[in-house]
Amino acid sequence: MTVLYCHKGRLGQAGRNFCRIGKIKCRYVVAGVAIAAVISMESSQADDHTQDQPESFLALGAALVPEFIGSEESRVVPLLAGRVYKDKRYIEANGTGFRVNIINSGRFAFGPALGVTLNRSDNVESDVIASLPEVDTAVEIGGFAAYTLPIGKNGRTQLTVGQQILFDVTNNHDGLRSTSSIGVGHSFSSRLQVSVNAFVDYVDDDFAKTYFSVPKDIETSLQPFAAGSGANKVGLRVNSLFMFNNNWFVTGLVSYGRLIGDASDSPVVNEEGSRNQAAVGLSIGRSF
């Protein structure tokens, strides 16, 4: 989970409520693919007893992300992010995923989540990768939890820890993927906020086999390889938000991830792809 915090300044209600930028979750080509999601939340000066309802919002943009998991080539994907609030509960769209926070709290969020890991088709730059079995787009269902803690006395800095777990329900990789994250966001002014977030991705045997293994019984120049479960990616994301006025804002993201473990050792990655997974994104949004 990527976060960007903003404090109460002179931006009006919209500026006070845009408090977190979450994810270009540059997890495998947007939430599984690189997703950019702008998340709003209460000011750290407000506590769980605050009655004000945060503003709903919508943001649209685009990101340059890896062509497939482990690829050294890139592709452009659309970004869609939004939240609709009822008190402090919300429904959130974050790129190719959705989440529903069922907790009416200014600091703790918890609820169901839906994600997508996009396909790896035979229409890729690498002819060798094209010889591997195709993987259709996987739809995943699970849950998330996050806790946000203000740091310091001025309410300008915020620490957020989060966890999300998703399971494939479409029989495409039949596995799970999990992301643990920790981020620090700081409001430099009433218009500019920046966050830095570290994350670790974990996948099970089925997920690893689907995306990183090389079967023995196919014709390919790659050596057979059996990938297993474990941590497979660590990374860092930097998000920024700039408010044009009380309603309109622009967000930017730079993300770098490093494939590790069996994902790093896989011929799919170290011969035909790259362990380095980077993404950049830009979106424009408005509160309502």
Image (cartoon, rainbow, N blue to C red):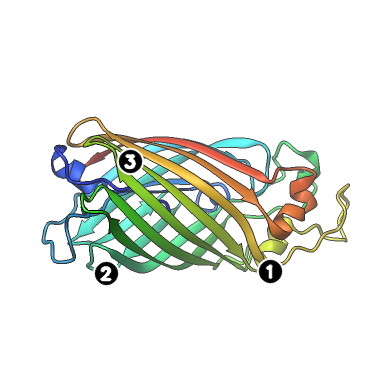
Position of residue 74 measured from the top left corner of the image (x, y, whole percent)? 61, 36
Q: Mark 3 Cα within 10 Å, few/some/many (few <14, many 20+)?
A: many
Position of residue 258 measured from the top left corner of the image (x, y, whole percent)? 63, 48
- Label 1, secondary structure: give it: helix
Pointer 3 or 2: first along the chain: 3
User: Viewer-nearest of labels 3 and 2?
Assistant: 2
Which residue occupies the foreground of this view, 16 or 224?
Answer: 16
The mark total stands at 3
Pointer 2 or 1: first along the chain: 2
Residue 229 left/right relative to 169: right
Position of residue 159 measured from the top left corner of the image (x, y, whole percent)? 35, 56
Instruction: Give, as a three-letter code, the residue at label 2.
Output: Ile
Pointer 3 or 1: first along the chain: 3
Instruction: Give, as a three-letter code, the residue at label 3.
Output: Ala
To which residue does mark 2 refer?
Answer: 103
Residue sitting at x 57%, y 65%: 170
- Label 3, secondary structure: give it: strand
Q: Mark 1 Cα within 10 Å, few/some/many (few <14, many 20+)?
A: some
Instruction: Give, as a three-letter code, the residue at label 1.
Output: Asp
Residue sitting at x 28%, y 38%: 188
Q: Is residue 165 visible?
A: yes
User: Marks 2 and 1, how far apart in space?
Assistant: 33 Å
* Relative height, residue 170 to residue 70 (above, below): below
Q: Which mark is residue 93?
A: none
Residue 183 left/right relative to 250: right
Q: Which mark is residue 59?
A: 3
Residue 156 left/right relative to 167: left
To which residue does mark 1 refer?
Answer: 205
User: Marks 3 and 1, how far apart in space?
Assistant: 35 Å
Residue sitting at x 46%, y 64%: 164
